[in-house]
Image (tube, grey):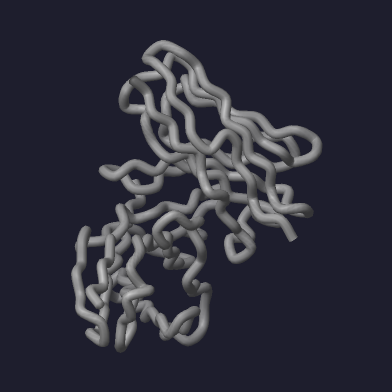
Amino acid sequence: AQSVSQHNHHVILSEAASLELGCNYSYGGTVNLFWYVQYPGQHLQLLLKYFSGDPLVKGIKGFEAEFIKSKFSFNLRKPSVQWSDTAEYFCAVISLLNAGNMLTFGGGTRLMVKP
Amino acid sequence: KAGVTQTPRYLIKTRGQQVTLSCSPISGHRSVSWYQQTPGQGLQFLFEYFSETQRNKGNFPGRFSGRQFSNSRSEMNVSTLELGDSALYLCASSLEPGAWETQYFGPGTRLLVL
């Protein structure tokens, strides 16, 4: 069965530190990849997505992610975090191999940024 | 334009009862998906509806069901509630199935089963 792994469940950083959150998925073929963010008390919202083309994608609020097909990874990065980045981050993947596949989410990573 | 709305926002039920949750998609969105979010399991896909038909279903027991109406509004029902059904239930709408870049999530309904 397809699965998505986020190895860091909780991350604590100080402001201005660099961030990298890992995301690995288990299945091959063509995939669409997403990172979602859920700020405290707010809706889940799309941070960035990769469908095809340049494997380095840029999203909102200075976030970026790199798709490395050989490693089945789509890690999220930000050079300098802010206190307002405190949130839960979810990686999600959908395989385009079969029609009717569902969006599969990782378990999430809770990021706390200390002011 | 208004976002995805879910009612009720909070619900407390006891084991064995049933519950119905409602989702109104963004105007013009015709696909509605439901997810269960728990601290241990993250977000898990429940089902997706389009044109009043269930297109896809996740790995949940038959106690979980849903439907979609002609105006694209959707409801999900959980019968014979169990303690483990306590979760945040999220609804997401998109223009059409597979249009993930247009998918927006609602605030969720937090269900507590006692």
Depth check, front residue: B9 or B49: B9
Residue B95 lies, in percent from the top left, at 71, 56
Residue sitting at x 40%, y 82%:
A64
**Which image quarter: residue B72?**
top right
Residue sitting at x 47%, y 71%:
A47
Residue B14 lies, in percent from the top left, at 39, 16
Residue sitting at x 46%, y 84%:
A58
* Vertical position of residue A33 compared to residue A67: above or below: above
**Which image quarter: residue A86?**
bottom left
Residue A101 lies, in percent from the top left, at 51, 49
Would you say residue B41 is visible in this rendering? yes
* Quarter the C terminus of chain B occupies: top left
Given the current orientation, which residue lies at the most extreme front position? A115
Given the current orientation, which residue lies at the most extreme top position? B16
Residue A102 lies, in percent from the top left, at 50, 49
**Which image quarter: residue A79?**
bottom left
Residue sitting at x 48%, y 73%:
A48
Would you say residue A30 is visible in this rendering? no
* Vertical position of residue B34 compared to residue B100: above or below: above
* Quarter the N terminus of chain B occupies: bottom right
Relative to A79, B49 lies left or right: right
Q: How many marks?
A: 0
* Vertical position of residue A81 compared to residue A91: above or below: below
